[in-house]
Image: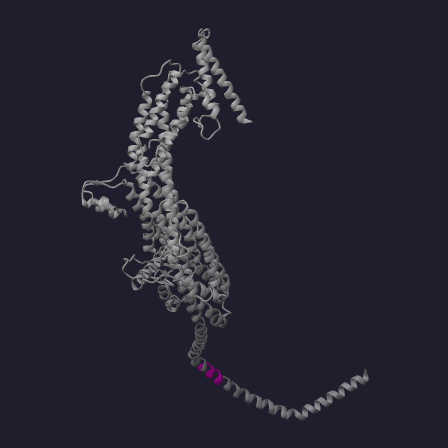
Amino acid sequence: MEKLEARIRNHDREIEKMCNFHYQGFVDSITELLKVRGEAQKLKHQVTDTNRKLQNEGKDLVVSMEELKQCRLQQRNISATVDKLTLCLPVLEMYSKLREQMKSKRHYPALKTLEHLEHTYLPQVSHYRFCKIMVDNIPKLREEIKDVSMSDLKDFLESIRKHSDKIGETAMKQAQQQRNLDNIVSQHPRIGGGKKYKKDICASSDPEVKNTSPMSEQDSGILDVEDDDDDEEVPGAQDLVDFSPVYRCLHIYSVLGARETFENYYRKQRRKQARLVLQPPSNMHETLDGYRKYFNQIVGFFVVEDHILHTTQGLVNRAYIDELWEMALSKTIAALRTHSSYCSDPNLVLDLKNLIVLFADTLQGYGFPVNQLFDMLLEVRDQYSETLLKKWSGVFRNILDSDNYSPIPVANEELYKKIIGQFPFQDPELEKQPFPKKFPFSEFVPKVYNQIKEFIYACLKFSEDLHLSSTEVDDMIRKSTNLLLTRMLSNCLQNVIKRKNTGLTELVQIIINTTHLEKSCKFLEEFITNITNVLPETVHTTKLYGTTTFKDARHAAEEEIYTNLNQKIDQFLQLADYDWMAAEAGSKASDYLVDLIAFLRSTFAVFTHLPGKVAQTACMSACKHLSTSLMQLLLEAEVRQLTLGALKQFNLDVEECEQFARSGPVPGFQGDTLQLAFIDLRQLLDLFIQWDWSTYLADYGQPTCKYLRVNPTTALILLEKMKDASRKNNVFAQFRKNERDKQKLIDTVAKQLRSLINSHHL
């Protein structure tokens, strides 16, 4: 502790020394500090005053600087905003333009605008929210454009479908005008008809593409076109139809990379429309307008497709068009075959043929093959011939029904020339006769002849414009005329001939008429040759069968005359009333037979105009039938008994018949030819009346036999009837020797006849 304290004292002394040493300096320093403090106070007051003055003076500046700062900030913000708006405004303008274009249905420009917007403008401002919304909307806008353009296309397709008939009608008018022009310019057959109007349409193809390019703002559909008069220029398909919707939609889908989808859709829809167009209405066959509308729609469809083919690159191609046309051709031909078969009016069939030819020529002008249509027309020609035949059958029937079957009387030269003008008839003797005079034929001859010529004209009308050679036309006309003669006219004549109320006078007139018609066939041949310019000497020329037809009719009429005469004879014979048990004969022939002979005389007097052979055959046939009927009357089973007196009365009737035969009712028989019809009866009656059995039995079988025509069976039947009558009348006379001898003689003759019959059979 002491050390420590000593140590402390040392240090205190040192401190005191040091302080003493520096004390003056310390005092000086304090003194200086005191001086400095005074100066510092002054300085402080000066600084405070200066600061106060500065603060007062700087307040306005600070405010101005603050304002300047704010201005600079605003200026910078405005500049940045202007820069950003400069980038955004084009985007907004393009979007606005896009909306306007879509609103005005300018879809292709809208699509181009959308592309610029997407690839050029939006990438520059892609970080803005509204741009992101736009980017998200772009696919929707594309779909909207696709949908709207597709909607326009659908409207176009629907409008085209509705107006196909108008387009087709226009195209067919053009074809008709072209045909008329060709006919005026040249009388030669038209080759490649319709090419002119085809070129007119194709020539406008390129301008059409430009005018109806996707930039076009026209509405889709059919343009309103007033119906022009026939002599004014008919508008073409491009004048009737605005094709811009198709072109716009095609370009839009091409840009969107969906061209194939569009092509498939378009073709699919048009195929559907083709099937609808090719479906004929059920009542199409009733009127020509039904066929015309059907053809117009088909033509309209293919005119549109042809235009699309030539004005677009690949939307439709030739293979697709050909496929559609093949389908259309087969369905059209099938429909025409079906519906035309219902048609029974030849005028409608002829109009239909002209319409089909115009239809074929129209489409041929657009490059479509139409040979099958002309082949089908040859089938329609056969049907037309059938309808003509049915119509003319009715015409012939009316002519034949209304005819009076009397020679045509003419009172003066005018009427005579009129008939000669209607029918080729020359008779120098008739020309020399004074008026009034008569033609040998009735009115149906010139009427039938003229109707045959009318039929030939009707056949010729159908062959026009079928591109057939003269030989083919000639062959068609001749074949149809042959059918008319051999089927229709022949049937009509046969019906009249077979009719129950047709009398002998009418049948005679029919024979005369058919004779004259047969002679006129060569004039019909000449008539056909003149209108077809094909000589009948040509190797393949069909000949007319008119001669055969009229010969057959004449033969039928002749047979009917023979049949009618026989029926009349039978009717008279039904009036026969013989007393087969009469003891004695009368003094004259039976009344019924006298009436029958009078009827035959008057009938054969009418036959003066008939060919000699016909009259002779009719007369011979009547006499043979009378002879046969009288023989049957004598031998019929109901006559069980007869007397010699009855036979003598019967003999008087046969003598009356022989007298009629000898009188020559019809000229031309040689000698006693007609009497030979009664030879069987004569020999039989002579045998019984003269009772010349010994001669008969002795000479039987010899060529010189007097009773060569008497059949032993017939003689036996008659003898048995006389034997029975003899037994009945002479029951008590058997006790008289003469009667017994007679009865025995009859039995002996009968026995010999039976022996003769048996030996003949052996």
Q: Quadrant of the N terminus?
A: bottom right
Residue 106's x, y, as percent? 40, 64
Q: Is residue 227 left or right of residue 678?
A: left
Residue 486's x, y, as percent? 39, 44
Coloring applied to the structure: one colour
Of all residues shown, which one is farthest toward the right?
Answer: 2
Residue 249's x, y, as percent? 44, 63
Q: Residue at x 41, y 50 (%)?
A: 380
For the image shown, how many numbered marks are present on the structure?
Answer: 0
The region drawn magenta spans: 45-53
Q: Is residue 334 left or right of residue 168?
A: right
In front of the other: 114 or 171: 171
Q: Quadrant of the C terminus?
A: top right
In front of the other: 683 or 329: 683
Is the stretch drawn in magenta largely helix, strand or loop?
A: helix
In front of the other: 87 or 319: 319
In front of the other: 545 or 278: 545
On screen, 16 above or below 516?
below
On screen, 344 above or below 105?
above
Whether residue 163 is visible here, answered yes or no, is: no
Q: Is-magenta flag for residue 49? A: yes
Q: Is-magenta flag for residue 425? A: no
Residue 81's x, y, as percent? 45, 73
Q: Residue at x 53, y 26 (%)?
A: 760
Whether residue 583 is visible here, answered yes or no, is: yes
